[in-house]
Image (tube, rainbow, N blue to C red):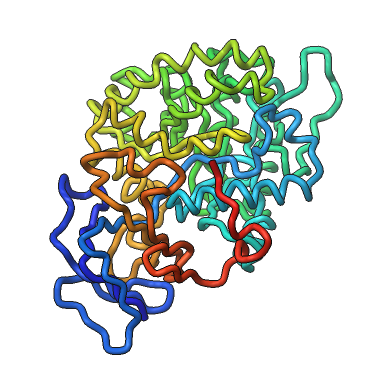
């Protein structure tokens, strides 16, 4: 057992840190939380009034996107992608993200390797390969290419399917292959070469087929969406997880909230792509599309907040730009109250992932995924940035991944030759 004493909880449910409490961890879960909690024989760590947060949740990542050019990424050997993905995921964990939702690319086999302890990484929920129509987002063939686009490689973020029957088959295959939910590309995108942002992806019948198959499997559909028209159509067809939403209008935001949807803005990726994308191999035709969605992103936060549309935390970064993951907190903090920004990575994200009471909270019975922060992130969101520099302790399932207060950490993949390596 582990007893954390003198902890001030910040979990996104209150505008100020709690009074000092103690948290008792037994095995992989939290057993008790309160002022008078004690346990004879427990390993005790006095946090001295530091902030204690639930492990953070990023609801929009691409763990296998190790190259900014996703067409190049899809052609890389699986072994190379797997090792690079392990490093990307480890970096996320050391930033305090103990759960991530992969929305295109990662496979159940990669998750099995993580679960077997072959590398240190956050809990991983996944959609498998994202579904796209021919010429849609994740079709990375140029205008003069007509060869089939394979989706069997680990580095491929998506697969192509056209027509209701193909969508049903692809949906069923991804669920059979271990997907926790489904991802469709329902509008044009930035990273793909031949689909302008204004394009709609899939017909209504195809979207409804994906939604029906997801419901048959007791899960839901997430959709890549930028324009208001695409978002409104997806909501009407039963999509519940709305990714990006940069160009959403007030009426559509209200309709999405009434339908029980959750939005997942990903503003940091446009900043990173604008600053570094071209230098890191992002194709010129994709660089040209960034400003179409970048400028509207901040306004979309205010629009969705006014409509009471819940927003989960997401980043959508590629390649070496994953290091900017935590900067999403600061970007959102320019428009939203810090409490709501933190809630997006805790209670709101947990609800989206259908893991309420399990992750994103500090309560009896929840997973002992915890992050200690030097200082109050409600007063300064930048404390959650800088690659976990202000996070002296990180626990995952009751195990110390990082503990600079006492120097004690549990067994981990990184105790090998990469033990001293730090992401920058």
Residue 224 against residue 215 in the figure, above or below: above
Quadrant of res 406: bottom left
Residue 356, percent across and down? Answer: 34, 57
Of residue 398 and residue 414, the one placed in the foreground of this image is: 414
Find residue 72 and report its horizontal and vertical position in percent.
76, 30
Q: Pick whichever, 249 or 390, lies toward us.
A: 390
**Left/right of residue 145 with respect to residue 218 in the rendered view:** right
* Figure disc tally: 0
Q: Horizontally, is 396 left or right of 106 in the view? A: left
In the picture, the quarter occupied by the N terminus is: bottom left
In the rendered view, tell whether residue 201 sits above or below residue 381.
above
Residue 42: x percent and y percent? 33, 83
Q: Nearer the viewer, residue 310 or 184?
A: 310
Image: 245 above or below 199: below
Q: Quadrant of the C terminus?
A: top right
Is residue 364 or residue 325 the one in the foreground?
A: 325
Q: Is residue 41 visible?
A: yes
Residue at left offset 62%, top offset 64%: 413
Whole-percent x and y of residue 376?
23, 47
Residue at (60% x, 52% y) in the render: 421
| Res 281 quadrant in image | top right
Q: Is residue 375 left or right of residue 187?
A: left
Q: Is residue 268 above or below residue 42?
A: above
């Amino acid at each position: 057992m582990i007893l954390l004493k003198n902890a001030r909880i910040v979990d996104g449910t209150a505008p100020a840190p709690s009074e000092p409490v103690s948290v008792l961890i037994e095995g992989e879960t939290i057993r008790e939380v309160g002022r008078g909690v004690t346990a004879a024989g427990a390993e005790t760590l006095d946090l001295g009034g530091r902030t204690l947060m639930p492990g953070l949740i990023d609801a929009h990542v691409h763990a296998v996107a190790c190259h900014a050019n996703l067409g190049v990424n899809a052609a890389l050997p699986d072994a190379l992608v797997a090792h690079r993905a392990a490093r990307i995921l480890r970096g996320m964990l050391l930033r305090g993200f103990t759960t991530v939702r992969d929305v295109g690319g990662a496979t159940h086999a990669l998750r099995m390797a993580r679960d077997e302890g072959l590398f240190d990484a956050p809990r991983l929920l996944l959609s498998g390969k994202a579904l796209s129509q021919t010429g849609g987002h994740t079709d990375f063939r140029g205008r003069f290419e007509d060869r089939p686009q394979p989706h069997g490689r680990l580095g491929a973020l998506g697969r192509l399917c056209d027509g209701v029957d193909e969508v049903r088959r692809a949906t069923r295959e991804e669920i059979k292959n271990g997907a926790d939910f489904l991802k469709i590309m329902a509008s044009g995108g930035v990273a793909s070469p031949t689909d302008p942002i204004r394009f709609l992806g899939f017909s209504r019948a195809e979207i409804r087929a994906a939604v029906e198959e997801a419901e048959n499997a007791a899960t839901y559909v997430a959709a890549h969406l930028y324009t208001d028209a695409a978002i409104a159509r997806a909501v009407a067809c039963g999509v519940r997880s709305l990714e990006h939403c940069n160009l959403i209008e007030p009426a559509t935001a209200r309709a999405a909230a009434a339908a029980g949807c959750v939005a997942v803005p990903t503003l940091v990726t446009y900043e990173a792509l604008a600053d570094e994308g071209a230098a890191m191999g992002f194709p010129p035709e994709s660089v040209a599309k960034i400003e179409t969605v970048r400028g509207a992103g901040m306004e979309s936060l205010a629009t969705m907040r006014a409509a009471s549309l819940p927003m989960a935390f997401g980043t959508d970064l590629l390649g070496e730009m994953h290091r900017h993951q935590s900067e999403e907190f600061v970007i959102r903090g320019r428009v939203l109250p810090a409490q709501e920004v933190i809630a997006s990575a805790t209670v709101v994200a947990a609800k989206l992932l259908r893991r309420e009471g399990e992750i994103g909270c500090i309560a009896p019975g929840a997973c002992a995924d915890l992050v200690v922060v030097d200082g109050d992130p409600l007063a300064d969101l930048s404390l959650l940035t800088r690659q976990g520099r202000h996070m002296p302790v990180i626990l995952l399932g009751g195990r110390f991944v990082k503990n600079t207060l006492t120097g004690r950490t549990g067994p981990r993949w990184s105790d090998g030759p990469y033990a001293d390596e730090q992401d920058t």
